[in-house]
Amino acid sequence: MANNKWSQPVQPPPPLFVGKKERDLVKQVNDELIERVIGQTVAYYAIDVDRTQYHPTYGEAINKTFYPPIRVHALIEWGGIQTEFEDNIGLDKTSTITIHFHKRRLTEDQDLYVREGDFVLYGDIYYEITTLSEPRQLFGQADHKLEISANCTKAREGLFDAS
């Protein structure tokens, strides 16, 4: 009878039966869908923070240095072309896209961290990342974010030189 004694487990079970194995399965399925079925490709140009000369007071850089581009698979929403009228300037056309990156694919597999101010090449147009958000959690778990959404605006001529 002594061998039939109940013992409390060391750790409680994962919430909603969603543990590491389930998160890894979701990552694997998302990777395959985005890379082989429904995703598009962008070239990602990250700022080289170590070699870029920043202003000591304002923290801004006129001339930025970038790492070589990295091919990234993502879901892309094209925002179209907007025409605006600016006083004393005239008509101005801008284009926007929203890129939905798979967070674990970027951080774990490609060692890439998305930041505002970085540039992407989508088609033959360069876009600057202007805002970031993490809108989705994995199965409602606050510690596990599923995606990073980047709102991007078409870069002005002369603002970014990929060469």
Image (spheres, rainbow, N blue to C red):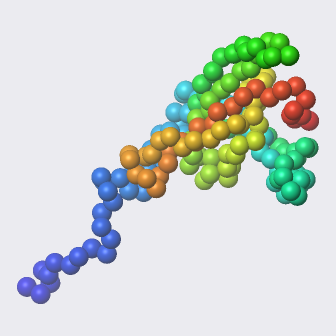
Which of 140/73 is in front?
Answer: 140
The structure residue drawn at horizontal position 53% and vertical position 37%, both measured from the top left corner, is: 32
Which of 93/38 is in front?
Answer: 93
Which of 22/131 is in front?
Answer: 131
Which of 93/152 is in front?
Answer: 93
In this rendering, the answer to whether 111 lies above or below 69 is below
Q: Quadrant of the N terminus?
A: bottom left
Furthest residue toward front? 87
Within the image, what quadrant is residue 69 found in? top right
Q: Is residue 5 visible?
A: yes
Q: Is residue 74 visible?
A: no
The structure residue drawn at horizontal position 65% and vertical position 26%, both measured from the top left corner, is: 97
Residue 53, x across and y down, in percent: 90, 53
The structure residue drawn at horizontal position 76% and vertical position 41%, both measured from the top left corner, is: 118
In this rendering, the answer to whether 158 lies above or below 45 is above
The structure residue drawn at horizontal position 62% and vertical position 30%, both measured from the top left corner, is: 98
